[in-house]
Image (cartoon, helix red, strand yellow):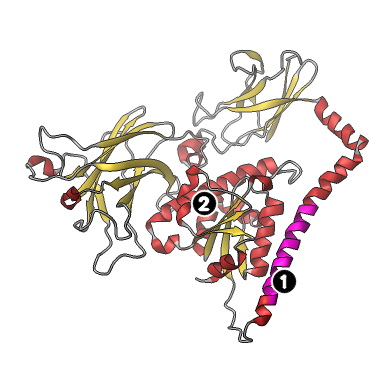
């Protein structure tokens, strides 16, 4: 291992099958570091396996082993040909191209001899390896080849991919120590107001340092229209006025350059939009002159909740009528189950998430765990530790998606901006916890996916497709039944 490479951390995801034929054992892999040449290179093999079909790489957090680590999640699929019977292992090497060149390899031995070109469920053989700690904004070259390797003067069967790790503003990467030192968790909450001859900028400072420089830059980020001197601040909120006329400031942006001791001149810069100071006055006048619009904004959310309640009530009445026709025998009720509710950032919290949580409590005998209902504990423990602890204690984890028609707008929640960012952090962390559980059949059984309306899973969330999925209120009955069938 070359200098500068973090210690190798890895875990293995087995190939799983819920319907494996009798007499055929589950195939798995055992991985360990192997940076030198494999011993199979030293001999000539009569028969060698073919190469891999696909090789995919993404990054996930590792809260179980080290909450500060972000690891590569490497998955590969074997080709379906007769040479699979000669396959003994797959070797994966990762080359880092950051400030220091790094190189590390891992060898994954297959625990069983392949008896078939397909897995017991009829699909392709697929395996996963979680390891190789990575740094932000670093280019990596990942290569993999099967063992025994091709002999000299034969065609090699190596497959490779390039991967660049996300920057420190990524929902997963920003919780690493290096990114926190660079100010990834700093939320300046910038407000910039354009007056006739100046721009007034207001922002929150960070505990990492007290030196800042505020710039007003053009919309193409090529010209600096004005700037303040480097500030030395000790208060939590700072205000500075920069001379820029209203004509010059059209379409301009605010940029704040922090100078923290942990990153000096290389800290994360933040930008904000400039609004006219007259806009707030105009909006107030509009509300006063047109009170019917203000009343409409208040009635629409209440009307949507009433329609939701009416639909739920009609459905429950229909279920109640069917229940009266059933035999009088009623089995004893089990105690409520604990459900951790994870909602997509686009879901409206007040009118969608809370309504669904109340439905779980009232009709599915569930004790709901919701981050916004435990703000005190989240602030005390931190989002990562809180989410990890709640996921461990919960009996079920439900991912909630809503259709675009249910998306939260400004009239839905006055504080939607700040809440949306915390919801994005919660959803990203929960999704990465789910990815780390893909290797465990028992852990994977915890997860359910619920869609409201015509919500669809995006391509980057395709891994959730392995979970049972329900569409409400169309499949409310099967959902509650499966939720309670622990």
* Residue 437 horizontal side relative to residue 26, left or right: right
Quadrant location, the N terminus:
top left
Q: Is residue 304 magenta?
A: yes
* Residue 179 horizontal side relative to residue 141, left or right: right
Q: Position of residue 229 (x, y in %)?
A: 65, 18
Residue ID for mark 1? 317
Asked which secondary structure carries label 1, the reply is: helix
Q: Work out whether mark 1 precedes mark 2 in sequence or the reverse, and give the earlier one.
A: 1
Q: Residue at x 53, y 48 (%)?
A: 457
Q: Is residue 261 magenta?
A: no
Q: Residue at x 66, y 59 (%)?
A: 356
- The answer to whether 73 is drawn above or below residue 110 in the figure is above
* Residue 397 horizontal side relative to residue 204, left or right: left
**Residue 394 visible at all:** no
> Which of the pair 46/107 is nearer the observer?
46
Q: Residues within 10 Å of mark 2 (few under 14, many from 20)?
A: many
Are the residues flagged by discs 1 and 2 in contact, CB closer than 8 Å?
no
Q: In 3D space, how far apart are the residues under numbered discs 1 and 2 (Cα atoms)?
A: 35 Å
Disc assigned to residue 479: none
> Which of the pair 107/242 is nearer the observer?
107
Boundaries of the magenta span: 302-321
Asked which secondary structure carries label 2, the reply is: helix
- The answer to whether 268 is drawn above or below residue 319 in the figure is above
Discs 1/2, front: 1
- Judged from this view, the residue extending furthest toward the right is 289
Residue ID for mark 2? 430
């Amino acid at each position: 291992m070359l200098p500068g490479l973090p210690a190798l951390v890895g875990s293995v995801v087995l190939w799983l099958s819920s319907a494996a034929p009798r007499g055929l054992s589950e195939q798995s892999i055992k991985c360990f570091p192997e940076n030198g040449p494999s011993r199979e290179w030293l001999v000539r093999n009569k028969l060698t396996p073919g190469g891999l079909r696909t090789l995919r790489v993404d990054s996930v957090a590792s809260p179980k082993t080290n909450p500060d680590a972000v690891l590569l999640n490497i998955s590969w699929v074997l080709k379906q040909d007769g040479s699979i019977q000669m396959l003994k292992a797959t070797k994966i090497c990762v080359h880092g191209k950051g400030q220091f060149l790094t190189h590390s390899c891992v060898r994954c031995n297959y625990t069983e001899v392949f008896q078939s070109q397909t897995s017991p469920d009829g699909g392709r053989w697929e395996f996963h390896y979680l390891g190789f700690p990575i740094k932000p904004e670093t280019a990596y070259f990942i290569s993999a080849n099967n063992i025994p390797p091709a002999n000299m003067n034969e065609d090699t069967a190596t497959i490779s991919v390039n991967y660049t790790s996300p920057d420190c503003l990524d929902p997963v990467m920003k919780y690493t120590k290096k990114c926190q030192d660079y100010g990834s968790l700093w939320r300046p909450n910038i407000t910039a107001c354009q007056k006739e001859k100046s721009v007034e900028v207001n922002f929150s400072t960070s505990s990492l340092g007290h030196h800042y420089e505020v710039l007003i830059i053009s919309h193409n980020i090529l010209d600096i229209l004005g700037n303040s001197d480097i500030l030395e601040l000790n208060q939590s909120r700072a205000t500075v006025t920069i001379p820029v006329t209203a004509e010059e400031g059209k379409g301009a942006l605010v940029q704040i350059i922090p100078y923290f001791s942990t990153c000096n001149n290389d800290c994360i810069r933040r930008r904000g939009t400039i609004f006219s100071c007259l806009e707030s006055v105009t909006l107030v006048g509009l509300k006063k002159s047109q009170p019917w619009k203000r009343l409409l904004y208040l009635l629409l959310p209440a009307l949507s909740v009433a329609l939701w309640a009416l639909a739920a009530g009609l459905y429950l009445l229909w279920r109640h009528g069917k229940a009266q026709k059933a035999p009088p025998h009623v089995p004893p009720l089990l105690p409520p189950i604990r459900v951790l509710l994870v909602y997509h950032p686009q879901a409206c919290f007040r009118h969608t998430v809370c309504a669904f949580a109340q439905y779980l409590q009232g009709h599915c005998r569930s004790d709901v765990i919701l981050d916004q209902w435990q703000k005190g504990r989240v602030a005390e423990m931190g989002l990562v530790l809180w989410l990890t602890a709640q996921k461990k204690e919960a009996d079920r984890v439900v991912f909630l998606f809503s259709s675009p028609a249910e998306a939260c707008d400004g009239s839905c929640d006055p504080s939607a901006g700040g809440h949306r960012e915390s919801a994005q952090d919660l959803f990203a962390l929960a999704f990465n916890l789910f990815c780390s559980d893909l290797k465990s059949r028992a852990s994977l059984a915890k997860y359910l996916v619920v869609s409201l309306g015509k919500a669809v899973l995006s391509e980057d969330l395709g891994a959730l497709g392995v979970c049972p999925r329900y569409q409400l209120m169309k499949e409310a009955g099967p959902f509650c039944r499966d939720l309670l069938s622990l």
